[in-house]
Amino acid sequence: MDDKTRTAAGIAAGLQGIKYDDKRLAELAAEVQVLNDAVRQAAAERLTFDDDPAAFASLMEREARK
Amino acid sequence: MSRDALALEDLSAVADAIAARRVTSVAATEACLARIESWQPRTNAFLRLDKDRALAQAAAMDREIAAGTRRGPLHGVPMAHKDMYYREGALSTGGSGIRRNWHAPVTATVLQKLDAAGVVELGFLNMAEFAAGPTGHNVHHGHCRNPWDGTRVTGGSSSGSGASVAARMVYGALGSDTGGSIRLPAAACGVVGMKATYGRVSRAGALARSWSLDHVGPLTRTVRDNARLLAVLAGHDANDSTTSEKPVPDYESLLDGGVSGFRIGLALPDDGPAPLDAQVGAAVQAAADTLGRQGAKITPLTLPDFTALYRCAEVMVKCEAAAMHRPWMEKHPEAYANQVRTRMEAGFFIPATQYIDALRLRAHFVTEFLAKMDGLDAVLLPSIPFPIPTIEETDVESQGGPATLAMVGRFTGLTRPFNTLGIPALSLPCGFDANGMPIGLQLVGRPFDEATLYRIGHAYQGVTDFHRKVPA
């Protein structure tokens, strides 16, 4: 079991109370790494302290075609 | 008019005929019931059909017309809906085994609107389990089959909606779209499907897949039908705080006028999770040429790299779905299809900070995409970039997580980005592949500009007949 799979095992058992076998934990660790890396990189490139999730809704209203 | 000829009419024509008392709602309902009797064994589009209730409702609509009351432009029209729209006291399975015997405590806002408009409800339609699946597979209620070829997928998750409209069993149907679930079955079955702007149509009383990405919308035979239906469905709802208070245009009155002077960006992306098939690319290019001959200015457009945006959507769906499904996933994991459960499990492992950042990134992605659309009225691209595959070759139920993720990615590569962006996207038929299966194009617009997409789509359908083809 590699470090990421071990971390996933810890989250599953220790934090979420859900059991998975080692094969599935390895798959999940790989899947989550891809997602986390993508979000972290996109966030590093774009986000600032003041970015608010609600900006999406207000932007849609503002950008509505007149 | 024969019963079958009546069933082959489109929604607007039937609604207008009922209003003019040339046709009764009962006759239209009986025409649909006859089509259902013929097509249900071949498609498995319906999960529940309520003939008696529908006929009683139709008779009541006819009495109102006879008394001089017309509720609106859908009065007396038979429809059916994806089995995820709640009706108080009625069964609502969500396509699942878990809710096989569950009765809804409320009625969905969109069903209330259709009731008020005088729509006749024939029953509820097949769908992917909990609206999670882009193909139409369903291990609990049986796979939905494409009316054009029963060995091929319908697209999902609104599988029964696409199949029933295509086979002329109903004049229109509600679907829902979290990553393409209206547009994929519309494309695969050769009908019209609109995912309107996020906030345009209420989600209250609709089974959720992902609160942030779910869109409610109509599937119909023509763009005119779709415009008529959306005008009834759209609008602010106090029961859904994400709905907009913007006035709803009379979309149907804005259909005419053509596309002369419209600027349309043509995107034929060949670098997504599924390469663009040559037949599909040629059909979409031909559609662009058609619109060009009608006076639109077609400009080649390179789409931005959607990878980060797509991943953010996955984070939202997985985290939100894992949260809402957690009690069942803990107690009854075996009650889910593997391909449904395994797509949610990563949600238990994604840090909350990543989920929140995905939400915070949405406004940036919208700003970037609208900059790409600067000077354009719409973007034209394929709905599904490859020919419609068979049920067998896309059955990943026994193959586990990675195979499921790859299959989903291939189907939703060109649809899911517009759920993240929240902007309107309309799918309509633009050809047939070598297997005789429909090909769909997608028109994408600016926020709350469904009217422009409808106008372009209507102009296109005015000079083409792909939407008039009926599976035999």
Image (tube, grey):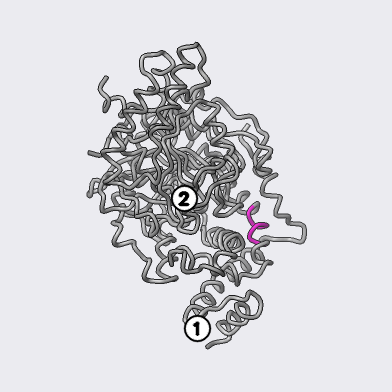
Residue B303 in view, yes or no: no
Graded by Cα atoms within 10 Å as few (under 14), some (14 to 19) or many (20 or more), the crowding at tag 2 reads many
Say whether mark 1 and mark 2 are on the same chain. Answer: no
Q: Which residue sits at x=26%, y=38%? A: B38
Residue named by callout 2: B180
The local secondary structure at tag 1 comes to: helix
Q: Amino acid at mark 2?
A: Gly
Range drawn in magenta: B357-362
Magenta segment includes B361: yes
**Residue B114, position as x, y percentages in the image:** 52, 31
Q: CA–CA distance between discs 2 and 1?
A: 33 Å
Residue B89 in view, yes or no: yes
Check the residue under mark 1 and report the chain it is in: A
**Residue B241, position as x, y percentages in the image:** 68, 43
The quadrant holding residue B321 is bottom right
Residue named by callout 1: A22
Contact between marks 2 and 1 (CB within 8 A): the answer is: no
The quadrant holding residue B285 is top left
* Viewer-nearest residue: B213 or A33: B213
Please identify the quadrant where the C terminus of chain A is shown. Answer: top right
Query: Which is in the foreground here, disc 2 or disc 1?
Result: 1
Instruction: Give above or below for B420 relative to B424.
Output: below
* Viewer-nearest residue: B100 or B459: B100
* Viewer-nearest residue: B226 or B277: B226
In the picture, measured across the screen, residue B93 lies left or right of residue A8, that is: left
Q: Which residue sits at x=50%, y=83%? A: A22
Instruction: Give above or below for B194 relative to B280.
Output: above
Instruction: Give above or below for B417 relative to B356.
Output: above
Check the residue under mark 2 and report the chain it is in: B
**Residue A23, position as x, y percentages in the image:** 47, 81
The local secondary structure at tag 2 comes to: loop
